[in-house]
Image (cartoon, rainbow, N blue to C red):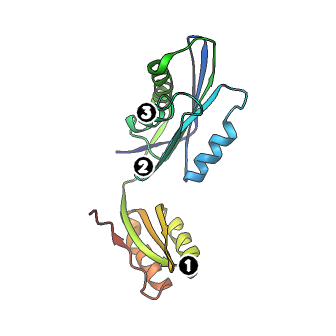
Amino acid sequence: MRYTLSEAHSFEEEIKKSRFLTLAWPIDSPAHATELISQHSDLSASHNCWAWRFGQQQYRFSDDGEPGGTAGRPILAAIEGQHCDQVAVLVIRWYGGIQLGTGGLARAYGGGAAKCLQMASKVQLIQRITLECHVAFAELALAQLYINEARGIIEHEQFDAEGAHLTIALEANQIAALKQQLTDLTRGRTLLSPVTTP
């Protein structure tokens, strides 16, 4: 069972005179995550560390100058530990003059993210099925529109000479209609098929 947030949430604490402000949001795309992190980062702070997850395949994190593995990865681990998806978390730190050490930093960043997500109001994500298809360049924009209208998530795009291989996560009750739309659009050339793991 996976959850996203129903609204943005924040949590603040002081650890050994360093101030940590954690901000968490629901996101509807990786670009949305990047935009929120960029908008809310405080350039006057010591560090703006973050992580986001969107679907099974897509996630990113940043230590923003903290020692490697002490900030971004613990924030991502908190997102996963709270069974969250389609979520971005930014932890802003104002350094207070006392070193926390690598273990202390990981606990501060990961712990702040976990507390923020625990307190946030959540909604269950609808289970989606992963499918794939190939769409020619001429039909790609319309295919993406149909996928969006079907509340599908494009988890991965890989381009070749003819068009794009798309990996799509889709609610079960939307599959038949989208299959028909793509078949009609491409005169039967684009077929949605379940992802086969090697």
What is the distance, in whole Å, between disc 1 and disc 2 at their CAs? 31 Å
Residue pictured at 49% horizontal, 17% vertical = 101
Q: Secondary structure at mark 2?
A: loop
Q: Amino acid at mark 3?
A: Ala
Residue 162 image offset from top left, x and y in percent: 50, 80
Q: Residue furthest right?
A: 44
**Callout 3: 10 Å neighbours few (<14), some, many (20+)?**
many
For disc 3, the marked residue is: 78
Q: Earlier in the sequence, mark 3 or mark 1?
A: 3
Q: Earlier in the sequence, mark 1 or mark 2?
A: 2
**Callout 1: 10 Å neighbours few (<14), some, many (20+)?**
some
Which tag is nearer the camera, tag 1 or tag 2?
A: 1
Q: Is residue 18 left or right of residue 176?
A: right
Which of the pair 145/100 is nearer the observer? Answer: 100
What is the distance, in whole Å, between disc 3 and disc 2 at their CAs? 18 Å
Tell me whether the residue at label 3 lies in contact with that at label 1, contact meaning CB atoms closer than 8 angstroms: no
Q: Earlier in the sequence, mark 3 or mark 2?
A: 3
Residue 52 image offset from top left, x and y in percent: 51, 43
Q: Is residue 197 left or right of residue 121?
A: left
Tell me whether the residue at label 1 lies in contact with that at label 2, contact meaning CB atoms closer than 8 angstroms: no
Q: Which mark is residue 137?
A: 1
Q: Is residue 193 left or right of residue 8?
A: left
Residue 30 image offset from top left, x and y in percent: 55, 52
For disc 2, the marked residue is: 125
Tell me whether the residue at label 3 lies in contact with that at label 2, contact meaning CB atoms closer than 8 angstroms: no
Q: Is residue 144 above or below residue 12?
A: below
Write down the quadrant of residue 41 in the picture: top right
**Callout 2: 10 Å neighbours few (<14), some, many (20+)?**
some
Which tag is nearer the camera, tag 3 or tag 1?
A: 1
Residue pictured at 69% horizontal, 41% vertical = 39
Residue pictured at 46% horizontal, 28% vertical = 110
